[in-house]
Image (cartoon, rainbow, N blue to C red):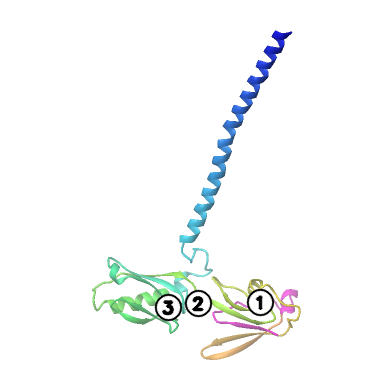
């Protein structure tokens, strides 16, 4: 009987050790899996922080057709001339400052038009300058909401946006909003236009064309 109990105790002790060893083998894998997850998360954050503010899919239009505006960040690169290359913001007056050239109008031009202007001016110093202009940040494509919306103020857009899409960015209307009497103010060619918007006609389908595409500088008044 004693011998049998002794053998049983040895068997139980061995089973316990094997079980413990199994746990030891699993834990490092689990920990390494957690560490890898944290590493991957950190890598994603790092990539997001150093990526350009203008991702390839942030515009619904050809970036070469984008019209520059104040506060946009652009990179001007002159081939084999790093001293003439620079990354600059478009100033509130619509101009940029470049080496040798000095002040140059940028707002209101496409990147292609600005590139051509720079090439012409650089020909005073270089016979055949090779220039590229890249938009790094779009900061001028903004609209404004005033009145009975949840989050009134300036809204910075990164792509073409309709009225209904913009409403989601401001959190919708307040309970006091007169959604049939919305007015969009738009300035074109020095003249201010007042465009009436009836929200209920848009969502009901009675006037789907009322869901107009917004433009830079539009102001939406919600009484």
Question: Dot 1, how many residues are within 10 Å of its Cα: few (below 14), some (14-19), or many (20+)?
Answer: some
Residue under circle 1?
211
Q: Which of 76 and 26 is in front in this view?
A: 26
Query: Going by the image, does 58 lie left or right of 6?
Result: left
| Span shown in magenta | 199-223
207 is within the stretch colored magenta: yes
Q: Where is residue 147 in the image (x, y as percent from the top left)?
A: 67, 83
Q: Where is residue 174 in the image (x, y as percent from the top left)?
A: 73, 77
Badge 1 marks a residue whose secondary structure is loop
Per the model, the C-alpha gap separating discs 1 and 3 is 31 Å
Q: Position of residue 64 (x, y in %)?
A: 44, 71
Determine whether label 2 and label 3 are within 8 Å by CB: yes
Badge 3 marks a residue whose secondary structure is loop
The C terminus: image quadrant:
bottom right
Residue under circle 2?
140
Query: Going by the image, does 142 lie left or right of 64?
Result: right
Q: Which mark is drawn over residue 90?
A: 3
């Amino acid at each position: 009987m004693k011998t049998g109990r002794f053998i049983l105790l040895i068997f139980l002790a061995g089973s316990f050790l094997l079980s413990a060893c199994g746990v030891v083998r699993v834990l490092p894998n689990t920990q390494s899996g957690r560490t890898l997850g944290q590493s991957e998360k950190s890598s994603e954050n790092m990539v997001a922080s150093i990526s350009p503010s203008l991702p390839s899919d942030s515009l619904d239009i050809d970036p070469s057709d984008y019209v520059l505006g104040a506060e946009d960040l652009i990179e001007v690169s002159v081939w084999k001339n790093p001293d003439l290359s620079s990354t600059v913001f478009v100033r509130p007056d619509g101009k940029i400052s470049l080496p040798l050239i000095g002040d140059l109008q940028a707002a209101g031009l496409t990147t292609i038009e600005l590139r051509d202007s720079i090439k012409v001016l650089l020909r005073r110093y270089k016979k055949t300058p090779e220039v590229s202009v890249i938009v790094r940040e779009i900061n001028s494509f903004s609209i404004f909401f005033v009145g009975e919306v949840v989050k009134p103020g300036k809204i910075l857009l990164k792509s073409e946006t309709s009225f209904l899409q913009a409403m989601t960015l401001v959190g919708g209307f307040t309970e006091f909003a007169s959604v049939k009497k919305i007015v969009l103010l738009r300035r074109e060619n020095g003249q201010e236009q007042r465009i009436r918007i009836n929200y209920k006609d848009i969502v009901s389908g009675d006037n789907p064309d009322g869901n107009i595409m917004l433009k830079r500088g539009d102001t939406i008044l919600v009484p």
